[in-house]
Image: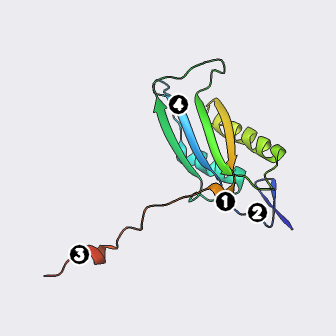
Amino acid sequence: HTYTHNTRIFPSSFVLDNMPLVNIFAKSTMRKPIPLVSLQSKLCNIWGTKPGVTKLMLMRVADWTDDSFQEDCFVSIRAKGTSERTREYVLDGMKDVQNAFKDHDLIANVRLETYEGERYFHLPPPPSPSPSSTSSSS
């Protein structure tokens, strides 16, 4: 079984909760806006994920070496490698990511690295205490 999401076809066994972490690096002198919420929405559509698992982080840097690509931002994506994520599938998705940035007048240099799920560890912060459990009665 397969289903279609934003014109991409996903097998029914495809897990939507394991993609991706997106680090966006931009020079601190670059003044074009980088609309994270809009880009997150577009990337969720590209990869078939939810905003809760598709985290975008913007890092402003003083400089980087080799300006041969003349990019506005360097986009580094880390994602779980799965059998469904073939080389062709990932490369097509990367082109779509580049186009999502282009839609905002941004030239993106995109790289994507996959990892093995058994070698991935994550420890989110504990849930915040509810307001009623932190108040004291007198």
Q: Residue at x 69, y 36 (%)?
A: 98
Residue 49 seen in this snapshot = no
Which residue position holds label 1?
Answer: 118
Query: Callout 1 environment at 10 Å: few (<14), some (14 to 19), or many (20+)?
Result: few
Can you say whether 95 is above or below 67 in the image? below
Which residue position holds label 2?
Answer: 14
Q: Are marks 3 and 1 in contact (CB under 8 Å)?
A: no
Tell me which numbered mark, 4 or 1, is placed earlier along the sequence. 4
Tell me which numbered mark, 2 or 3, is placed earlier along the sequence. 2
Tell me which numbered mark, 4 or 3, is placed earlier along the sequence. 4
Helix, strand or loop at mark 3: loop
Task: Answer left or right for 23 relative to 126.
Answer: right
Can you say whether 80 is above or below 98 in the image? below
Q: Are marks 2 and 1 in contact (CB under 8 Å)?
A: no
* Amino acid at circle 2: Phe
Name the quadrant of the N terminus.
bottom right
Q: Residue at x 62, y 31 (%)?
A: 105
* Amino acid at circle 3: Ser
Residue 118 seen in this snapshot = yes
Q: Nearer the viewer, residue 38 or 90?
A: 90
